[in-house]
Amino acid sequence: MSEQKLQSQTVQTTGHAWDGDLQEYNNPLPVWWVYTFYATVIFSIIYWTIYPSWPIGKGWIGGVSDITYVNSEGETKTHSWNTRALLLEDLNQAAVAQKPYFDKISAMSYEQIAKDPEMNGFILSAGKALFSENCAPCHQAGGQGVIGFFPNLTDDDWLYGGSYDTIHQTLMDGRRGYMPAFGEVLDGEQIDQLANYVASLSGISHDSTKAAAGNALFHGETAACYYCHTSNATGRKDMGAPNLTDNIWLWADVPAADAAEGKVSAIRNVIASGLNKGVMPAWSGRLSPEQIKVLTVYVHELGGGQ
Amino acid sequence: MQTGLEDQIGLYQKRIPIFTRSVKGRFRRFKTSVLVLAYAIYFLLPWLPWSRLDAPAQAVLFDLPGRRFLIFGLTVYPQDVIWLALLLFIAAILLFFVTGLVGRAFCGYFCFQTLWTDFFIWIEHRIQGERPARVRLYRQPWDREKVLKVGGTHALWILASFWTGLTFVAYFTYAPQLVIDFVTGQAATAAYITTSILTLSTYAAAGLMREQICTYVCPYGRFQSVMYEPETLAVHYDARRGEAAHGRASARAGQRTLAERHEKGLGDCVDCGLCVQVCPVGIDIRDGLQYKCISCGLCIDACNTIMDSFSFPRGLIRYDSEKNLASPEPAAPKVQWKRLKPIGYGVALVLMSAYLVYSVATRGSFDRAVNQIRQPLYVVLSNGDIRNRYQIRITNKAGQDQTYVISARGIPESALDLGNFREVTIKPGHSGLVQASVRLPPALAAKTRHFELVITPQGKPAEVRAEKVRFDMPGKRP
């Protein structure tokens, strides 16, 4: 009550009167608010002048500010200010910072890179980034692969060889693993015998009578497994034929099967249906030679190389 | 109902300008020495040279792009953030400790707001004269004299503020180069922005807002009062002595000596008002302890000067405790530390300071982080052996190149494969990454739950550090 009375006494009116006594209070906005409002108007005009603002037809007012950066080729580029150009500036700054490292990489031999602590640090971080972006979808983040699909790069078994040169070749040109389906030329009994023989090579429990028969098939001309896997079953790296005598399995998921019968059955399936899915794409057109070199050393280090 | 001062003055109050009178005395001398010392340190420290191999020759340099703080012979890396935490903890406890004993000593003598305001008032005093001259100048119209004097004061304030801002920036980059770059327009944008913000804020805080910062802005001023106890020493007016039975009165004829005054029942306070005139926050200490008081002691100096001139005993305004003042027979004021709070804070202060000193003194010359690679956690090799891999990151915190030797404890030495890096040399301030792979036959792997990776700086066998790591294999549960 008293507050209202106070207001009617102190608040001024606009000075107009209607119907004799109808008056209008004059309650102007606070001065600080008005000036802040004017300041925002001035600010927006300055902003429009400097930065991209109004759309005009298919284009827009670009603003007077621009972004200049030097790319890794040493060329100076200038764009009118926009967030995409800002990103380009950032990316090129990073590329310029990386360039000395990549220049060194292309000048050094694999062995020199692997012995230089600083370059080795660069390989571990740049290689990880490149691997995560390009290789991890198949070979998984740590290079551990997936049994039945993609080889494990962290073990000491290399289908096509683990030297720098063979890894480099694999990356550049890709690989295509192939094994014919023996279900078309052998009967079920023979395939079972072969499977038992292959299991015996890795010390998995098996039927030794069947394995002996399998041994004959393996080295005979009907199945002729030894053509690719060699007569002592250690495989041929020049054609990607795996070593059958070690503990490493790529296509038959032997480690996952619990019972001996399951392990033999996993091998049997591979022999019967063959393989035509061991495809590694070629990266020569997609990555730069330096990037492939970084990946070569990185992958070599993953499995300890050969 | 009693209402507080704030209720009486309204929420939006126009600032009443304060023109402080200069005063001489013990507390003024102490404040001046703190000011000179603090300014000498703050303004000169960035210019102190310090020879370094791998960084600019500046004794104190906060090298943000290099992610390190160079403080004389000490290099602090982000990993040492615990030191900053300790330092902040010590600063906080020191504040609590001192406040509990002698009140807002930080506010009155050491706070940068107080120091800079004091300096700005000194400039104002040098140009515009003593308090009466400044009051006169304030009241007179804007003539030539006023424009020159007030303008000159503000110009000097802005100059001082600018140098304050630039000095702050000089802690983050090589100072001599910064000044040249700053003038020629080649310094970093951040340097210009920081300097402008600090120039403006220093000018505003120490020149224009002054005591309003302490009263309205600063949280410390408010929460320091909760640390006061009845035993805490603070600047007090001895009302019992000053007011006596019939209150304070001026020293007119007939009430000039103590004997005359006591006979009339008058207090010792001659109501000269000098304690109010010297107060930088514009309060009357005779109203009692109040939140605006920053405890600078200038009113003590002022009152003592007057007491001396009348040959009255000193200490009408003095450092004393509420408890002592209220007691029937007040003793001589002294610091009362035999209480739970000061002793607790004191113990915490000593422990934390000792730990900080110990931690800095026994810092290693390198940092290390050993992580087991988890993708994959283990690999079964072609002959059935199990391999685990580990990533070792070594950061060289010493001032020169250092070679580190990596070895293993708890497994056969031949099981550890470090590629080419059984020894790795790392540049100062840099980190090196080494991949270790450990290969164990299944029988040994099953027995090995943990082993240690040992990093030894070459030539410093005392600084050897061992990191315990796990060894995993299929089917093994931790």
Image (cartoon, coloured by chain):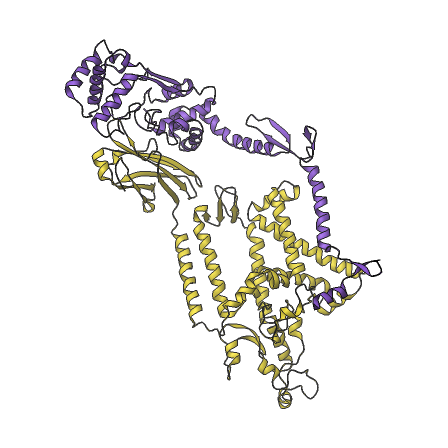
Chain colours: A purple, B yellow
Identified at 67% across, 53% down, the residue is B159
Percent across and percent down for residue A280 are 39, 20
**Nearest the eye: B219 or B161:** B219
Q: Quadrant of residue B466?
A: top left
Q: Quadrant of residue B369?
A: top left
Percent across and percent down for residue B99 are 50, 67
Percent across and percent down for residue A12 are 78, 61
Q: Quadrant of the C terminus of chain A?
A: top left
Percent across and percent down for residue B2 are 60, 75
Q: Residue furthest left?
A: A209
- Residue A49 in the figure: left or right of residue B95: right
- Is residue B26 depicted above or below B430 in this figure? below
Q: How many marks?
A: 0
Q: Residue furthest right?
A: A20
Q: Is residue B474 visible?
A: yes
Q: Quadrant of residue A67?
A: top right
- Residue A206 in the figure: left or right of residue A93: left
- Is residue B32 depicted above or below B476 in this figure? below
Identified at 68% across, 61% down, the residue is B123
- Is residue B352 depicted above or below B130 in this figure? above
Q: Is residue B77 visible?
A: no
